[in-house]
Image (cartoon, helix red, strand yellow):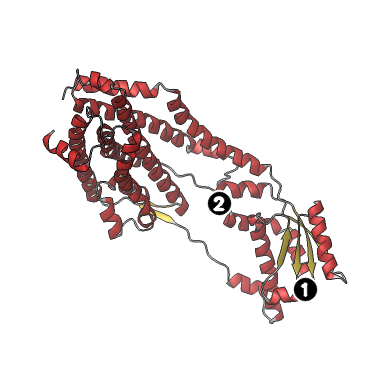
Amino acid sequence: MRLDNLRVIAAREYLARIRTKSFWIATVGLPLFMGAVLVLTALLLTRTTSAHRMVIVDTTGQIGERLVAELTESARLERLTEQIEEALPGAEAAALEEKLQGFVPILEAPAADLAEQRAGLDRRVLAGDIDAWLWISENGLAEDRVEYHAESVSNFVTQELLTRAASRIIRAFRLAEAGLDPDEIERLGRSVDLATLRVTEAGSREEQAATGVVLAYLLFFLLYFAILVYGQQVMLGVLEEKSSRIVEVIVATTRPVELMAGKLAGICCVALTQLVIWLGTLALLTLPQVVARMSWLDGRFEVPTLAPSLVVHFFAFFVLGFFLFSSFYGSVGAAFNNIQEAQQFTSIGAVFVVAPMLLFWMVLNDPDSTLSVVSSLIPVFTPLLMLLRLAVKAPPWWQVALGYVLTIGVTWGMIWVSARVYRVGILMYGKKPSLPEIWRWIRYA
């Protein structure tokens, strides 16, 4: 193999793609879009008022006044803040707490004609005078049910807060009726928080479980989409050159194997350029100085950090996964005549890319289980699943090393097979080749 030819082809593939508008739109547009979503969401939340005008009708005469006091007392904000943090994670909870105005409850006595009163409350909701009305009755309490009437019932956060407040008041009422002290029972029945600390060689450090999940999820699916998208680009590039007959001119001065290797190397560099920009943007946004200026986070959300070793593993597994699957896609593009024929065959390769997604949650939940270890050492699964294990909990060094060795061996074998298919298929036109014909190309090329 002549390295000069390979270098020229790789440079041509790299520059031809990196100079296109579509590349830069995707490369710069994705971080800008994600940043805009975060900023706009925070701004919208900080400008949203959550005052909920609500009429409360208590036909029992026991709950209504207490519920109004619960929703309007001075300690209301502290309790609602705790409930919001449970209902909404991170930045959304912080922003909502900052602007929370809570409920505006209006206690209304039951009328002589209850049916007419209910109809009148409906009319007030439709007219916009109130947002909702709450109906508390003896039958409802017996069935552990309180009626909430509103024009829209999709405000699940408001409903959750209201449900908890009503439940607390009704529970305290029932305990008092039974001769028990509600405050003492509430104190004894308080739930506890599970403080999660990650054990490392440098010592234990506190880390939210969600932080590790977010980081693992992000890296896993970034690698998944990169392998899938750029593998398809290799196939489409080969098909385009083959259909335009440009390849007949190129192979007059270079060997087909050099052409395939140069194309893979060039497109791999394009993908690496894009990933470096994306991960660089992520690293920049997670700097402590940047995070500290995000006032809506207010310290409630721990931003995941990227360890240098994990970044190295990410790029190493991407290169291996890229060459493993892209060599297959390149050989498919060379063997067939159009995209319709090729896509039927690429489903074989897609199975091995999609399969790790089915194991994602099992590996994430128990990265040291037999299933996790064995599946992460299957070479076609290793780039995705071994990276997932590394993001959650560093496996033994020998498992990582074995994963690299096995994947490198299988990748080399796939490149060798694909090169033989490419050598024959790139100049074959006409009918769609069968599997026995492709097997003959591999044996005799």
Q: In this view, does 156 lie above or below 319?
A: below
Q: In this view, does 4 lie above or below 322?
A: above
- Residue at horizontal 60 percent and vertical 41 percent from the top: 41
Of mark 1 and mark 2, the one earlier in the sequence is 1
**Which dot marks residue 97?**
none
Q: On the image, numbered disc 1 is attached to which residue? A: 62
Image coordinates for residue 350, horizontal then vertical, percent: 33, 44
Q: On the image, numbered disc 2 is attached to which residue? A: 89
Image coordinates for residue 388, horizontal then vertical, percent: 35, 48
Left or right, 44 with respect to 360, comes to: right
- Residue at horizontal 61 percent and vertical 41 percent from the top: 42
Q: In this view, does 59 lie above or below 394?
A: below
In the rendered view of the protein, which quadrant contains the C terminus? top left
Please state which amino acid type lies under the numbered disc 1: Gln
Give the crowd class for mark 2: few <14, some 14-19, many >=20 residues within 10 Å.
few
Image coordinates for residue 303, horizontal then vertical, percent: 48, 44
Please state which amino acid type lies under the numbered disc 2: Pro
Q: Residue furthest toward the front? A: 431
